[in-house]
Image: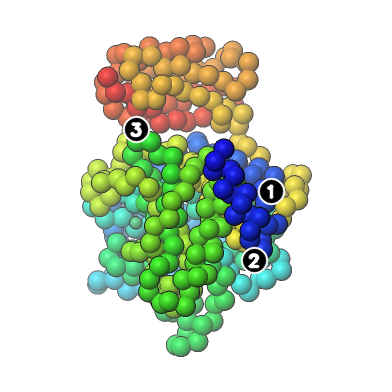
Amino acid sequence: MKKLTALLLIAISSHTINAQSFIQAYKNRADAVSQTDIITNLQEFASWGVKKTGTQANTDALNWLKNKYLSYGYTANQMVEDTFPYSNTTSKNLIITKQGTVYPNKYVIICGHFDTIAGSGVNDNGSGTSIILEAARILRTIPTEYSIKFIHFSGEEQGLLGSYHYVDNVVYQGSNRVLDIKMVFNLDQVGGVMGNNNNTIYCDQDMGGLPGNNAASATVTQELRNCTALYSPLQTAVDPAEDTDYIPFEEKGEIITGFFERIRSNFPHTVNDTFANTDPVYIYNIGKAAVGALQHFAVASTQTLGTLEPISKSTLESIKIYPNPAKDVINIEFPDSDVQNFSFEITDFEGRSLLKTTNKERVNISALTNGAYVGIIKRGDQNVIRKVIIAK
Ligand SMILES: [Zn+2]
């Protein structure tokens, strides 16, 4: 309750009461983020292995991203690759543009890197990548006043090579700024570690670099905090912006903000930055905050538009599986009273089935050893996926 009071005071004292009011249409679209999609995106991201800049796996991941956008209904015309040199080879950033209705030549950029180093990089930065994909899926048909660029950078781990190349060659031609950017919203390492109390997200504020854009960053970072409170269950804290892909933009005077995990994982940049070592529920909640905030920054339509609206993929999305981590027994609780004709299956990450039950709301899992697994619930033609941890 304290938090809500504080938020209302902020809203009343600002001149943007309207823009920071709760908007039901924004909430509906934030709620369209799918836990199943997040988990699927993370596992597919992991499947390409170590996506080091300049390697075949890096190119494979780029092509996977392009196919994801095509599957959402984006066209090849909306996608541009930005190639930059690296070592003896090249790598590519991927940029997808959705045109705005009122300010088609002014851009809100949501971005994050997809290259990894040493490991599959499910947290750093499959987490941000999976959220950008969900935001693009959900908002494709939603009118926004400002154009949006969804950007997947490569070369981040070698020193922000991809984002520097983009700023120096696409945003700028020589000393001319040829791309009018409203603001830059970056997501990096938002995966957390399951088992931690991941209830808070860092909002990155520009407190250094050029002094002239710091106040504007403080404003959008506060707006990001407000949107997180309005459209997700997470709390926020502020940390100084550093060490990721918004920095090349900051150095040119652009307005930046971003998300970064609050309880920091030690796994990034190691072989242990895996799906097993992330918290997909945290990523799901950050996804809701990101979709809420992106609509605010790009000024999305506040109308509900009937068939154009994203609908929650499945009523099973709000299913509960608990306790998680579990010891001997897992309970499955449906959002409705229809508990007939469902199955529950536990597989390992290679898809090998380890346990399967039918119509059981209480499942004995004592035969499984400690570790992270994939739980799949099927009912009719609906399918929902959850990460399950067993710890005895
Ligand atoms: Zn990163």
Q: Amino acid at mark 1?
A: Ile
Say if mark 2 contacts mark 1, CB within 8 Å.
no
Q: Which mark is residue 195?
A: 3
Q: Which mark is residue 23?
A: 1
Q: Quadrant of ligand 1?
A: bottom left
The answer to whether residue 136 is left or right of residue 119 is: right
First in residue order: circle 3 vs circle 1: 1
Q: Secondary structure at mark 2?
A: strand
Q: Amino acid at mark 3?
A: Gly
Say if mark 3 contacts mark 1, CB within 8 Å.
no
Snapshot quadrant of residue 103: bottom right
Q: CA distance from mark 3 to mark 1?
A: 32 Å
Q: Which mark is residue 223?
A: none
First in residue order: circle 2 vs circle 1: 1
Residue 82 in view = yes
Give the number of callouts: 3
Q: Which residue is mark 2?
A: 146
Q: Amino acid at mark 2?
A: Tyr
Write the residue at 56% across / 52% down: 226
